[in-house]
Amino acid sequence: MSSDRVRVFAVEDQPQLLKGLLKALALFPEVEVVGSAQEGEAAVDQIAAIVPQLVLLDLELPGIDGIEVTRRLKRRVPEVEVLILTSFDDEQKVYEAIQAGASGYLVKRVGPQKIRSAIHDVMAGGTVLEPIIAKRFWNYFHSLQTTHAAPQNPWGLTAEELEVLRFVAKGLSNAEVGRAMEIERRTVRTLLAHLYRKMGVHSHVDAAVLALKAGIVEV
């Protein structure tokens, strides 16, 4: 078995939806499904024992919900990436999930290929938000933008780092940023790593919120 396959664990409380998700994942040769669960607390324990690379997680679960599952996983196995796959599409849920440590947020109406590309984007270091959700999410933070002072860049971000930040704040994936800037995706990852370090953050969302507050990013 190839060592470069992405080890994925699925959490979904509805048996038919879980069956369909597992069937779809089985079509992707680069994905290895290493387990599944239908309840939050059991999922946390199983994931902590197996330590997959990525968890596909529903929010609406019996017992503890997906937000709390994400929080607990990030405390116990912080290296595991969490990709939310749920029916909720409101910005408050997106905010709570990302703040809890999720690396992406998809709604269940998306097709298998979108899930596949989202897995790739998350494993490449990106934060995945569907464009419509991303727009609503950043509008949710619109009031954070500075309106009474000139834009500030206290972190000393370069022009290229600022450009990357402005693109990811609009919900673009690393690959999409690379195409827009005409640079390689690995260069996008490097630029993001540099600006994360300068800003003292660990995700697209945290960086973008700080930039919104400073007035150097608009949505």
Image (spheres, grey):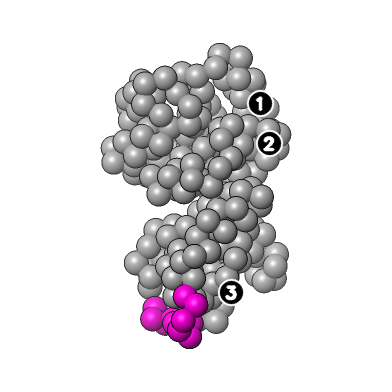
Which residue: 51% across, 33% down?
Answer: 56
- Report crowding for label 3: few under 14, some 14 to 19, many 20 or more residues within 10 A (C-alpha): some
Which residue: 57% across, 59% down?
Answer: 139
- Which image quadrant: the N terminus? top right
Verify whether residue 152 appears in magenta.
Answer: yes
Q: Quadrant of residue 70?
A: top left
Verify whether residue 4 appears in magenta.
Answer: no
Q: State the CA–CA distance, disc 2 to disc 1.
A: 12 Å
* Helix, strand or loop for disc 2: loop
Circle 2 residue: 110
Q: Amino acid at mark 2?
A: Val
Q: Is residue 217 left or right of residue 154?
A: right
Front disc: 3 or 1: 3
Q: Which residues are magenta?
A: 146-157
Viewer-side residue, 138 vs 121: 138
* Mark carried by residue 163: 3
Up the image or down, 197 lies above or below 27; here it is below
Q: Amino acid at mark 3?
A: Glu
- Report crowding for label 1: few under 14, some 14 to 19, many 20 or more residues within 10 A (C-alpha): some
* Mark carried by residue 24: 1
Q: Residue 144: where, in percent of width, then height?
A: 46, 66
Up the image or down, 100 lies above or below 192; here it is above
- Which image quadrant: the C terminus? bottom right
* Helix, strand or loop for disc 3: helix
Residue 132 seen in the current view = yes
Q: Residue 9: where, in percent of width, then height?
A: 48, 28
